[in-house]
Amino acid sequence: MSTHADLPLFYRMVPSEELQNRGLVQLLVHFEWNWVGVLRKDTEGGEHFLSTLEPMLAQNGICLAFTETLDNNVGFYYLHEMIQSFEKNVNTLLDTKASAIIIYGETETITWLTVFLMANMLSPLPYRRPVMKVWIFTAQTDVILHLLLKGFDVQMLHGALSFTIHSKEVAGFQEYLHNIHLADDERNGFIKPFWEQAFDCVLSSSSSLADFSDPCTEEEKLESLPAPFFEMSMTGHSYCIYNAVYVLVHALHAMYSSRSTSRVMDNCSKSASRDLEAWKLHSFIQRTSFNNNAGDEIAFNEHGELAGGFDITNLITFPNNSYVRVKVGRLDPQAPVGKELDLNEEKIQWHQNFTQLPPFSLCNDKCQPGHNKQKKEKDIFCCYDCVFCPEGKMTNQTDMDACISCSEDQYPDQGRDSCIPKVQSFLSWTETLGIILTSLALFLVLITGLVLALFIKRRDTPFVKANNRSLSYLLLVSLLFCFLCSLLFIGQPNKVTCLLRQIAFGIIFSLAVSSVLAKTIVVIMAFTASRPGSKFHKWVGNRLAYCIVWSCSLIQVGICALWLGTSPPSPALNTHLFTDKIILECNEGSVTMFYSIWGYMVFLSIVSFSVAFLARKLPDSFNEAKFITFSMLVFCSVWLSFVPTYLSTKGKDMVAVEIFSILASSGGLLGCIFSPKCYIIVLRPDLNSKEQLVRKKHPCS
């Protein structure tokens, strides 16, 4: 009936089935029921209903658990077929995980369902199945539901939801029902069979119920019937008929009242005026618009449809086998598409067998927070497995398709169902490792200061002079600042410390290594210049040493200046290194410049080691090249072991490794070069004389 091609004069007084289908889908989506069943009869209407509904369900993520199609020969008069149908469908209908089952209602479908449920109830206890279903009835069942419940345990349908055609109470309808009596049957032929069914009596001996029921007294009153078996209020179907009659009345009145019709009436006989053709009413029906006695506006749209909607009712039963239908929602055809359903969930009463309210109707249990859905192989999309979220991700809602990441300053908890703030991590002054490194650095600063003080105090002694005291002072001061600059790596990084960390260490350490190199070259030049006829005598002195120190150091200063001018270091938050921590660190800016500084220090160290190694066996008594060689060997060993250790650690442990390497390498230089000198100055003053120093100046002396 959706097209006017074959029925151009067709007018729809009932709401469109398309609106009901949209309402069904919206109802399922509202309760998150994605695994539902459909029970319908093998008719053209049932086939059309299923073919229309199924694509709409799929578009909204809803799957059909089953579709049961009943044969045409199903009804009270086919008891054998009913029993066979029960045995065939009992497992599917009652054992399925689908709690929501849609009943596409025709009389035989509801008949089958009532007999089916009654057969299950009467089954022996071991074979009886608990009925935990939400029955969803379409509007087609509304007119016959109450007739079929007589003598049936209505408790099994408690909590059912039903789509009913929207209706309102019409003034005078109650009085009309009170005044109905059997004499009215002469006009419509309906009252007598209805009377026999409603009052369970017979009006004549020829009735098919004569052997099973008592005769009717003909004094029965409709208002005496229990409310569940006869509703005194106007049903939706009756409301449509009521409106249809008044539409026709208004159209006839408009046609007779029109001037053109009046002129025709004047020229025609009275009998001809009564012989009206239906098509003449068409234009008047199209233009009909009025308010009925219930206050509803009655008017057709351009498609010949009355803009009526559906009510959603909830079936509530009582122990005395009576029931009421409570309106819990409405389908408004005037609402935007997809928003037609208006539901008051708080009014709904569910079946007492349900432990979860609203009940679930799912292929499998919902995935709890901390899990995500994973599609099963060869299964439809409504059935899935629940998989625990991987590390670093979480879900905080049920049935999430994928795990999500927390914000950068948070991380998932152990259950992967919520995010908790990350802890800021850096090498602090107050933690054990920070205290140990700080204490070690300050201790080495103190030792270096004492050595420097000792050399200054004994500056005029032959041993201090013979070891190039100016370079010794410079080396000791450099080592002192090397120990101090390691403290820049401890504590929360800020803009100043990030700028000074690598640059200060690079310049100061280059100055120290340059001093060591200068010391070694001075030893070689002094030995060479001491030979007879040597031309290197003019190179011996402080000028050569200072030239080596400052030229080597200025190269490092230039690299650092270029680094500061292009991409200087800055504080940064590393949120990706650890799952549960935010690492406060220094972003080194240009990686190339960072490695250039370290590469230059490695180059100076290799040159110093090579020169010291070549000069280690020179026969001067003041030759300290062998101590420098050993110190540079310690230095290189420390930094060679530093590289893999540094790369294998993360966070504040990397900072601790770098601090330890700075202290170890600087301490190696201090210990290997100056401990023998301090031993002679403090414990063997007898060796600290000019005669002792020149005694073994040459092997032949």
Image (cartoon, rainbow, N blue to C red):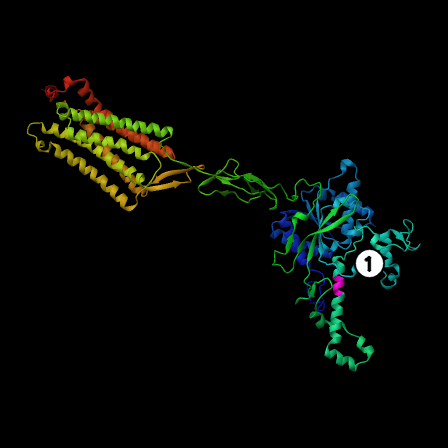
| Residue 610 percent across, percent down from the top left | 21, 30
Q: In percent of the image, x 54 and y 42: which residue is there?
A: 396
Q: Quadrant of residue 613?
A: top left
Give residue 496's quadrant in the image.
top left
Quarter of the image with the C terminus in it: top left
Q: Does the rendering let one see residue 208?
A: no
Q: Is residue 636 rendered to the left or right of residue 239?
A: left
Position above or below: 574 against 666: below
Residue 222: in sight, yes or no?
yes
Question: x%, y% of residue 143?
Answer: 77, 55
Q: Measured along the vertical axis of the image, is residue 196 above or below residue 242? A: above
Q: Main secondary structure of the magenta part?
A: helix
Left or right? Give the position of 421 relative to 352: left
Q: Amino acid at mark 1?
A: Leu
Q: Secondary structure at mark 1?
A: helix
Say left or right for 158 vs 187: left
Image x and y of residue 138, in percent: 71, 53
Quarter placement of the N terminus: bottom right
Q: Nearer the viewer, residue 31 or 420?
A: 420
> What's the residue at 77%, 48% (across, down)?
112
Extent of the magenta region: 240-244
Q: Position of residue 122 (x, y in %)?
A: 80, 40
**Mark 1 Cα within 10 Å, few/some/many (few <14, many 20+)?**
some
Q: Nearer the viewer, residue 279 or 492?
A: 492
211 with respect to 561 (left or right): right
Residue at figure coordinates x 78%, y 81% from the top left = 266
Residue furthest left as drawn: 533
Name the residue tied to disc 1: 177
Taking the view exactly as shown, the residue that stands out farthest to the right is 205
